[in-house]
Amino acid sequence: MEMKYDTRSITIGLIILLSVISIYMYLTSPIKKNYDLQAIEDTLYKGDRIIHDGGFARGLCTQVNFKDYPELDEKTKEMDYILGGEFPNKHESCLKNARLVKLVYEPDLKQAIAVYRCEYNGVGEELKVSNYQDSCDYTQYLTKWNFPIGKYTQVPIP
């Protein structure tokens, strides 16, 4: 008994098999995964560069305006009093020694956000950086306030 193979059925079967293999390879591709990692790496590199180069002090980052937050009104007065009216205090920045305290990645937006902090002599500094629109935001606060990480520093969202 001889088996005959239908070449049309074999061709359709091979096309389906190759399609399934191609889709599987695309979905598990390191290139796709690396795109997400690239956004995180870019954000961390940008944060390190801003800190190392002192970009926050040269006005490259937006300064948080406490007047936009009514709940911080009394805290602003307290900080102005303690720092002698120099808010933000640009003389003793500790940001060169800042550490990464929060890293968030939103895969749907392809956006990574990094928050860096440091504390020195009762004053804390926070820098928030994003890979979206080369944005960064900077603020100072008194360490006794237990300032929530990343709450008042803002970056645009795509």
Image: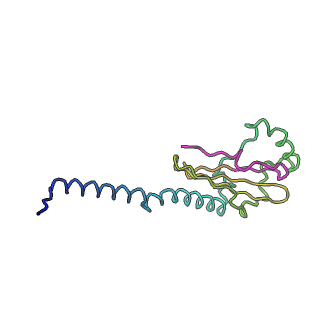
Region in magenta: 138-158
Residue 11 x %, y %: 19, 56
The chief SS type of the magenta part is: loop
Q: Residue furthest left?
A: 2
Viewed as shown, does residue 9 lie left or right of 111? Answer: left
Viewed as shown, does residue 136 lie left or right of 97? Answer: left
Label tally: 0
Instruction: Examine the rendered structure and indicate whether residue 155 appears above or below residue 67.
Output: below
Q: Quadrant of residue 6?
A: bottom left
Viewed as shown, does residue 144 lie left or right of 4? Answer: right
User: Can you say which quadrant of the picture contains the N terminus?
Assistant: bottom left
Judging depth in this view, the residue of 138 and 116 nearest the camera is 116
- The residue that appears at 65% across and 57% down in the rendered structure is 55
Judging depth in this view, the residue of 3 and 115 nearest the camera is 3
Residue 58 x %, y %: 67, 54
Q: Residue furthest top?
A: 70
Residue 157 is inside the magenta segment = yes
- The residue that appears at 51% across and 46% down in the rendered structure is 108
Residue 19 x %, y %: 30, 55
Residue 85 is inside the magenta segment = no
**Colour scheme employed for the rendering of this structure:** rainbow
- The residue that appears at 47% across and 59% down in the rendered structure is 33
Residue 127 x %, y %: 68, 53
Q: Residue furthest front?
A: 1
- The residue that appears at 71% across and 45% down in the rendered structure is 151
